[in-house]
Image (tube, helix red, strand yellow):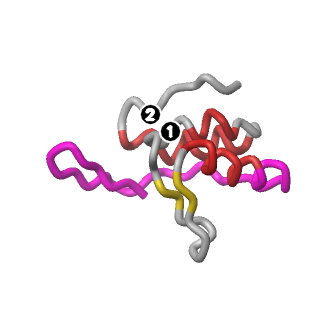
Amino acid sequence: MSGQSGAPEPEDVTRLVAERLNVGDAAGLAALYEPQAVLAYPADRPVTGREAIQAIYQQMADAGVKFAIETPLPTVRFEDLALTS
């Protein structure tokens, strides 16, 4: 499953996170992040980089965590940045 690419549009991120976690694809989920992204989960122990982010999501997948697929809220855009829900 790994080897998947990022989201074509910011609005796709929420759905792709849920889909990839729900099938246990932590590598594909981590591919949605920039190489040196920071994941503040858990909030008191943020991790940096795709490898560390993949490890967090792998722990969640191994624990059987599943995300519901919801309709995302509108995306806020400013220049080349987008804030999604």
Left or right position of 1 against 5? right
Amino acid type shown at disc 2: Ala
Q: Nearer the viewer, mark 1 or mark 2?
A: 1
Residue 26 location in percent, x, y?
A: 69, 40
Left or right position of 26 against 50? right
Nearest to N terminus: mark 1 or mark 2: 2
Q: Looking at the image, which residue is at 53% across and 47% down? A: 49
Residue 7, numbered label: 2
Compare residues 66 and 73 and report the one nearer the observer. Answer: 66
Farthest residue, direction bottom? 44
Compare residues 47 and 76 and report the one nearer the observer. Answer: 47
C-alpha separation, residue under disc 1 versus residue under disc 2: 6 Å
Q: Which quadrant of the figure contains the N terminus?
A: top right
Q: Looking at the image, which residue is at 43% across and 41% down? A: 34
Left or right position of 16 against 57? left
Q: Report the span colored magenta.
A: 59-85
Q: Which quadrant of the figure contains the C terminus?
A: bottom left
SS for dot 1: loop
Is the residue marked by circle 2 packed among few (<14), some (14-19), or many (20+) residues within 10 Å? some
Residue holding disc 1: 32
Is the residue marked by circle 1 packed among few (<14), some (14-19), or many (20+) residues within 10 Å? some
Amino acid type shown at disc 1: Leu
Residue 46 location in percent, x, y?
A: 56, 66
Number of disc labels: 2
SS for dot 2: loop
Is 35 a magenta residue? Answer: no
Left or right position of 17 against 84? right
